[in-house]
Image (cartoon, rainbow, N blue to C red):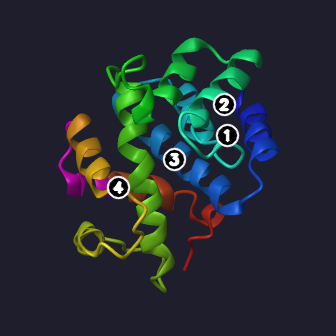
Amino acid sequence: MDRSEALDLLREYTKNDSLVKHGLAVEAAMVHYARIGGHDEARWGLVGLLHDFDYERWPEPPDHTRKGAEILRARGLDEELTGAILSHAEWNAAEYPRDTPLRQTLFAVDELCGFLTAAALVRPERLQGLKPKSVKKKLKTKSFAASVSREDIRRGAELIGRELDDHINQCVTAMAAIAGELGLEP
């Protein structure tokens, strides 16, 4: 499966524009970290783009991820990438542990990209100039983007061996590169 096919699949199953943009944001962060770590950018990007493609149709666990995995396997996505997508959900942890850089990075960027989007949307400058200090202040406000797991953001940074400030900077940089597509330009 190439990126064009993956994007078509995402758009086939996801009509909500915010969810499509979330896939694009996570893809950007995955490609960014793949580049830093010397991994296959195209493969890591597919995982980011497709990680929640089934969420709109099957939002409840364990259908979310498992129904999608069936579709991905039927469309020929290899098991390494399908397993990585399955690994980002807690209910799959026993069978699909976060034991590879690909799986760890997906977990690390998923919640943070969602939170960064929320943080950028309330700023006139959007992503431009968004600093870790500002993001961490918002993280302390439990009512702000309340559905985002602060614990998963913290655990994700630890899992990939990054200080939270650095991890925030890396994801902001990745997302800023596609700010126009994300609707996050000033």
Discs 1, 2 touching: Cβ within 8 Å:
yes
Name the amino acid type tagged 4. Ser
Q: Report x, y in % for residue 22.
A: 57, 54
Residue nearer the viewer, 3 or 98: 98
* Disc 4 and disc 3 in contact, CB within 8 angstroms: no
To which residue does mark 4 refer? 149
Q: Which residue is mark 2?
A: 68
Query: Which structural element holds mark 1?
Result: loop
What secondary structure is marked by label 4?
loop
Considering only vertical position in the picture, is 46 above or below 183? above
The Cα–Cα distance between marks 4 and 1, rounded to whole angstroms, is 20 Å
Which quadrant is home to the N terminus?
top right
Where's residue 95, x and y in %? 42, 16
**CA separation in Å, label 4 and label 3:** 16 Å
Q: Verify CB contact (< 8 Å) between mark 2 and mark 4.
A: no
Q: Any mark on residue 54, and which?
A: 1
Q: Of marks 3 and 1, which one's residue comes earlier in the chain? A: 3
Circle on res. 134: none
Which region of the structure is painted magenta? 161-169
